[in-house]
Image: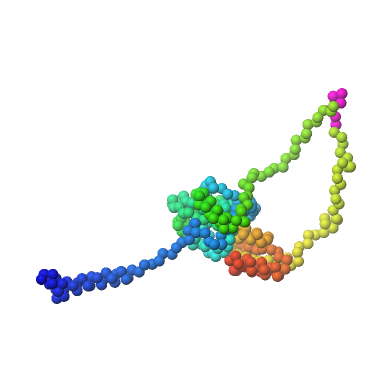
Amino acid sequence: MRLFQWLNPSSGVVPAICIAVAISACSTAQRPRVPVPKVPGAVDIPADASYKVGSPYQVAGVWYYPAENYSYVEEGIASWYGPDFHGKRTANGERFDMNALTAAHPTLPLPSIVNVTNLENGRMVKLRINDRGPFKSQRIIDVSRRAAQLLGFQEKGTTRVRIQVDPSESLAIKNLLIAKNPGAMPQIASAPRAGVRAEPLTPPLQVPSSSSSGAVGKPPPVTQSRLPPLAAQPASVASAPVQLPAGTGIYIQAGAFGETGNALRLEQQLQEFGHAFIVPTMVDGRQLFRVRLGPLQDAAGAEELLATIKSYGYSDAIIVKY
């Protein structure tokens, strides 16, 4: 009987329970689940990636020597890059994604996995090296915008970091990519060597002759008949001016940047297509660095090369004449 009275609608207990359930349902409905966007991680390898070490190359008068180094550890200045290169090809053929956990390094194999620690706040992220750079003094790595956010220096622009290669993950990615393309075994570049200085050779010692007098014999004089005659060079080669190819006023301008590091990065990437160079200029009081490729021999070749460069993501590339 008491149970019936407790459940009796006239008692007000059941309506109260219903109201509570309804409020709970409404509060649940008002908090829909928001999907968290997935950030491409360091070990997420795009389909268009390839493994390469690369040959020694020169940028702005400085030589760089790519090489495998699985014990690599270095401390220095890190910077970041993003919108100017988003969607464009990296040095190993990937499309650069400024929201992925990637980075550029001047000499480590592409790709390599590295742990980057911000020495100013202790934050650490794992990144995949998939591009070349930076090419500015004292900077040792260029990270993506997302990596800069996680490391806590996007607003500041640069920070001091420690880079350490993860050998097991780097080797795993190398073996995976080589297995996908067995014919593309990497060419391992030699380590940098100190500059070689030319010095005169020490004159050879005079060997005593076998004559009974014991006097030191003089070597026989060198006569012209003992040396092969040099081939005569045509006079026209020495005196004629250098003839540039026809249509040398045709160039491709692949990009223009306000930051020299970005211009140097693009210049290095374009070297595989020919002679790339930077043209500093002032536009409305602002310093710009234009990256051009050429001279090209004819307009047809320029159009073909322009299409190739645009396919790498440089949609603003144009043909210029001067």
- Mostly what secondary structure, the magenta segment? loop
Q: Is residue 117 magenta?
A: no
Magenta segment boundaries in residue numbering: 211-218
Q: Quadrant of residue 28?
A: bottom left
Q: Residue at x 86, y 26 (%)?
A: 211
Residue located farthest toward the bottom when viewing the structure as drawn: 10
Q: Residue at x 77, y 35 (%)?
A: 203
- Tag count: 0
In this view, the residue in front, 136 or 172, is 172
Scheme by which the image is coloured? rainbow
- On the rendered image, what quadrant is the N terminus found in? bottom left
Q: Residue at x 76, y 66 (%)?
A: 246
Residue located farthest toward the top when viewing the structure as drawn: 213
Q: Is residue 91 left or right of residue 10?
A: right
Q: Is residue 285 left or right of residue 20?
A: right
| Picture coordinates of residue 36, whole percent (x, y) | 41, 64
Q: Quadrant of residue 244?
A: bottom right
Q: Residue at x 89, y 42 (%)?
A: 225
In this view, the residue in front, 24 or 279, is 24
- On the rendered image, what quadrant is the C terminus found in? bottom right
| Picture coordinates of residue 142, whole percent (x, y) | 53, 56
In this view, the residue in front, 90 or 18, is 18
Q: Is residue 178 visible?
A: yes
In this view, the residue in front, 148 or 31, is 31
Q: Quadrant of residue 7?
A: bottom left
Where 321 falls versus 214 (above or below)? below
| Picture coordinates of residue 174, whole percent (x, y) | 55, 53
Q: Is residue 79 visible?
A: no
| Picture coordinates of residue 251, whole percent (x, y) | 68, 66
